[in-house]
Image (cartoon, rainbow, N blue to C red):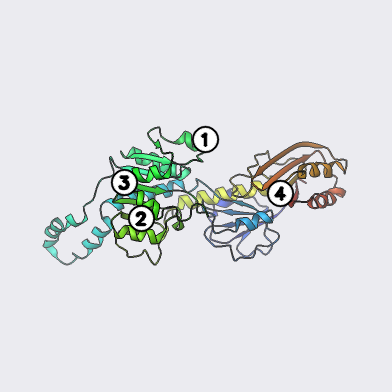
Amino acid sequence: MAYQIKTLNAISSAIYTQLGEQYSVSDDAQAPDAILVRSASMHETPIPDSVLSIARAGAGYNNIPVDACSERGICVFNTPGANANAVCEMVLCGLLLSCRDVVGGIEWARTLKGQGDQVEKAVEKGKKAFVGPELRGKTLGVIGLGAIGVLVANAAASLGMNVVGYDPMISVEHAWKLSRDIRRENSLDALFSACDFVTVHVPLSDKTRGMIGRRALSLCRKGVRIMNFARGGLVDEEALIAALGDGRVACYVTDFPSDALIGLPGVIAIPHLGASTPESEENCAVMAAAQTRDFLESGIIRNSVNLPAVDVAPAVKPRLLCIHENVPNVLGSITSAVASFGLNISDLVNRSRGAMAVSVVDIDEVPEGVRGALVDKAKAIAGMKRVRLLGV
């Protein structure tokens, strides 16, 4: 079967290591089966009825209308961890820049051009204006211990920092990767009050928007330095600017500049370079392409942000893939629909996540003459969002 993939941004050619000859990739596909996107906003972009999945080549997915996609049975993927090392390195850079005024020192040194033999003397006299503390022995608070947060926490500990972490939803996988030197805090209040540095690594949502605001900043030690390489909206800018003004915050390093922050004393605004490495872009593209391929061909779901994980084997026989509301009687209606055509179910997997569920039904054989009728009958089930017959 041939598949069309539409790209909304330039995507690394590494995707072709995952997509075979049956895939056609372009930025102008009119009826694509799937979309690959990086940073382009899709909230005002019409999504064709043909679209079965959207893969974000990156961790954040606030540029995708996830709720609307769920309502239409569109699977939305992201690529957590693919850019983790790139972002981790930028956080370490931010920590160093926030201590000694390296940026200010470089800019000042440029003003010495043309002073000839006097440059060395001017440097020795002027360098005291850019002095700052070392990282070793200071306490770093890491909010969010996912793929990026774990790398940052472990790297900071290896630099001699005391590291405390907060993540009530930490996965078993990430917990195993976390250094035993990292201390766990049971509340954000305790973390804010304990740290000289704070770095945040959580998704932006209605619950996390402005989480570093007036109250959180009031709990921080005077002179705290804050890193934000996750999403700009996690920090309440009005509260931050006030805290910079009264000295509560010594430095704010952000990968998300805004007009209000640019040029403000104590702010280091970086132009969203966190994942801007060729290695990161390639890793994200490969992961997004592999997830798209597995879903289109076999209904396998990994790293979806709106549907449950479905870890099944590749489809080698007819497979009915049903995306539906997580309500009673849907699964029974699906199996009844299959049985009504005298077909035998060889395997069945049902997974749910919140209001959504996915049922994967493997069938021994589906004669060509009943395939369309089977799909139509499944589509007619109350609560059904999307039905596909794979492996035929």
Q: Position of residue 333 (x, y in %)?
A: 80, 44
Q: CA distance from mark 1 to mark 3?
A: 28 Å
Evaluate whether residue 216 shows in this view. yes
Mark nearer the N terminus (1 vs 2): 1
Q: Disc 2 versus disc 4: distance between alpha carbons?
A: 42 Å
Q: CA distance from mark 1 to mark 2?
A: 30 Å
Please tell me which residue is depicted at 52% across the width and 38% down the height of the picture.
Answer: 171
Crowdedness of circle 3 by 10 Å Cα count: few (<14), some, many (20+)? many
- What residue is disc 1 on? 172
Which is closer to the viewer, label 2 or label 3?
Answer: 3
Q: Is residue 367 left or right of residue 264?
A: right
Q: Nearer the viewer, mark 1 or mark 3?
A: 3
The residue singled out by tag 4 in the image is 323
Distance (Cα) linking label 2 and label 3: 14 Å
Contact (Cβ within 8 Å) of mark 4 with mark 1: no
Residue 18 spot, x, y in % from top left: 60, 48
**SS label for mark 3:** loop
In this orientation, does residue 270 appear?
no
